[in-house]
Image (cartoon, rainbow, N blue to C red):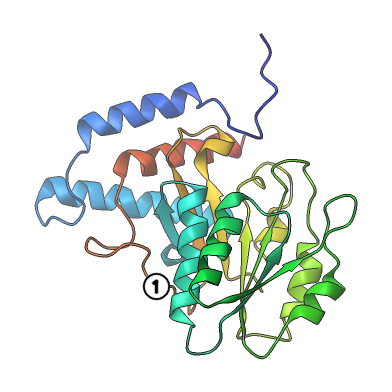
Amino acid sequence: MIYFDNSATTQALPEVVDTYDKVSKTIWGNPSSLHNFGDQAFQLLEQSRKQIADLLKVHADEIYFTSGGTEGDNWILKGTAIEKREYGKHLITTSVEHPAIHNSMEQLKQLGYDVTYLPVDDEGRIDVADLKAAIRPDTILVSIMAVNNEIGTIQPLQAAAEVLKSYPKIHFHIDAVQGIGKGIQDLVMNERVDFVTFSGHKFHAPRGTGFIYARRGRRISPLMNGGGQEKINVQELKMFQRLRQWLRR
């Protein structure tokens, strides 16, 4: 049988699974602990974070690990809405987003936020003129999918970024879950983008792994409280190191 559904999920690479298994057996300390076991895990945590940051050409402290795209999207949208609620309650997205975005927006509407859904053409692509027209004084966030998960349309991210350069206080989020391996890294990681969501299982990592990019100076409130926003998963981080090596082949 030939597998043609890599846009839905990819098979984890054997070397990635092997690395995950080895790390789970050898580096199992709490990275927050002060003893040697904890320090060993902490060093691996930060090494992995830096390697991903280097691959994306960003700072290590701008990378946060998550359980995948859904958590990342929810965190960025809801965290931004909470953090910037005193400045406005208007959000902009497209009419063809993943449910992680659409459903989060609908939930925020129930909490008193106003959401504008940009229309798309026959190919599922927005018109940046509609984006510009939708911006209001109380707009706090624009969220646009990089590559559509159903039909593969690539949105005009660079043109959207150019529009938003005139509105530096508006946060710009890109859902790049489908973007890895599509040759659009420069479009996604441009200087006007504030947040980007990535999911590991879309590029040969196990399910339940992912990370977000959050540009320095852009604050988002925690999605969960009590244990720190980023759940430390050492096996996941080492696994991303192996994926980095594979992506650079």
Position of residue 236 relative to residue 121, above or below, is above
- Residue displayed at 49% across by 82% down: 84
Position of residue 177 relative to residue 78, above or below, is above
The residue lying furthest to the front in this view is 110
Q: Give percent across and percent down for residue 106.
A: 57, 63
As rendered, which of 86 and 45 lies closer to the eye? 86
**Is residue 239 at all visible to an observer of this figure?**
yes
Q: Give percent across and percent down for residue 1.
A: 66, 8
- Disc 1 is placed on an element classified as loop
Q: Quadrant of the C terminus?
A: top right
Question: Is 215 situated left or right of 144 in this image?
Answer: left
Position of residue 16 relative to residue 71, above or below, is above
Callout 1: 10 Å neighbours few (<14), some, many (20+)? Answer: some
Q: Amino acid at mark 1?
A: Ser
As rendered, which of 229 and 151 lies closer to the eye? 151
Question: Mark 1 = which residue?
Answer: 221
- Residue displayed at 44% across by 77% down: 82
The residue lying furthest to the right in this view is 122
| Image quarter of residue 208 | top left
Q: Give percent across and percent down for residue 42.
A: 25, 52
**Is residue 219 at all visible to an observer of this figure?**
no
Q: Give percent across and percent down for residue 162.
A: 78, 76
